[in-house]
Amino acid sequence: MKNELLQVQGLGKAYLPSKPVFSEVSFTLDRGEFVCIIGHSGCGKTTILNVLAGLDQASAGHVFMEGREVVGPSLERGVVFQSHALMPWLTVQQNIAFAVKSRWPDWRAAQVNEHVEKFVALVGLSPAIDKKPSQLSGGMKQRVGIARAFSIQPKMLLLDEPFGALDALTRGTIQDELMAIVRQTQQTVFMITHDVDEAILLADRILLMSNGSETAEGYRPGGMAEVVVNPLPRERTRASLHHLDGYYALRNHIVDFLVSRAKAH
Ligand SMILES: Nc1ncnc2c1ncn2[C@@H]1O[C@H](COP(=O)(O)OP(=O)(O)OP(=O)(O)O)[C@@H](O)[C@H]1O
């Protein structure tokens, strides 16, 4: 109980009052935990992440972080979107320094620089520190977004399909990097992904969401169908994943959910 960072209670969102996208979504996040959420397009994953970030309001329910209700955005929660959202006129250094100065307005320039350099090095981008986003590849831009989010040392990191636009090779490398940084910093992470293997590699728990659907009894909102605890050893790597006992059972369980249960017609 004392290790809980975030509590989500009875969350619901309705754009049309008669057809809530989802309802009664409840879960908790422990400090240092990595949780992935999986579900088909439109079930409401991004909406939930935006509510956790304080960027959107739920129609029902509450989110508490350390016992205080989330009512707006905060530097305690870092967000990384699929479209890295860097400021194009600023260099890598300046993009990250901007966030660091917002977080610690009293820091002197040398302190800001040192901090920025540390996080740029963490994602392997030191040689590109003075480049602008237009001079970087998609993978590099996404690394800058990740470095920026980590640099403000938020209590929680919210990632919305951060690798969705990347090719498989780059994606794999950055997954490994992200996992190493998360283990090193003991960061709490909530991440949306469509990739079952990505969830199995990264997450301690995987939240499975179902879509809203029309049934014989009428419309049924989507919601949290199941919470799957990842039984694989935490020190896993991409290369070893499919050799681990329990990997195929876990993978099949999630894929079966997505194929036959997530979108009940
Ligand atoms: N501003 C809005 N007005 C009306 N409907 C909206 C609005 N924003 C989202 N929706 C609807 O709410 C549902 C959930 O959207 P959301 O983006 O949260 O889903 P998602 O699970 O993240 O989907 P994806 O995996 O495609 O990103 C979708 O059906 C979407 O069309």
Image: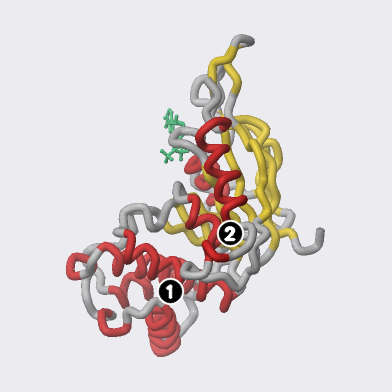
Q: Position of residue 21 (x, y in %)?
A: 53, 28
Observer-nearest of 47 and 93: 47
Q: Quadrant of residue 261?
A: top right
Which residue is painted at 50% across and 46% down in the image?
50
Q: Is residue 59 visible?
A: no
Q: Is residue 227 left or right of 236 when viewed as pictured?
A: right
Q: Which residue is mark 2?
A: 203
Question: Along the polypeptide, which appears first: circle 1 or circle 2?
Answer: 1
The answer to whether the residue bearing label 2 lies less than 8 angstroms from the nearest atom of ligand 1 is no
Specify the amino acid type for callout 1.
Lys
Q: Position of residue 26 (x, y in %)?
A: 69, 41
Q: Is residue 239 left or right of 72 when viewed as pictured?
A: left
Q: Position of residue 205 (x, y in %)?
A: 64, 54
Specify the amino acid type for callout 2.
Ala
On screen, residue 86 above or below 249: below
Q: Is residue 197 visible?
A: yes
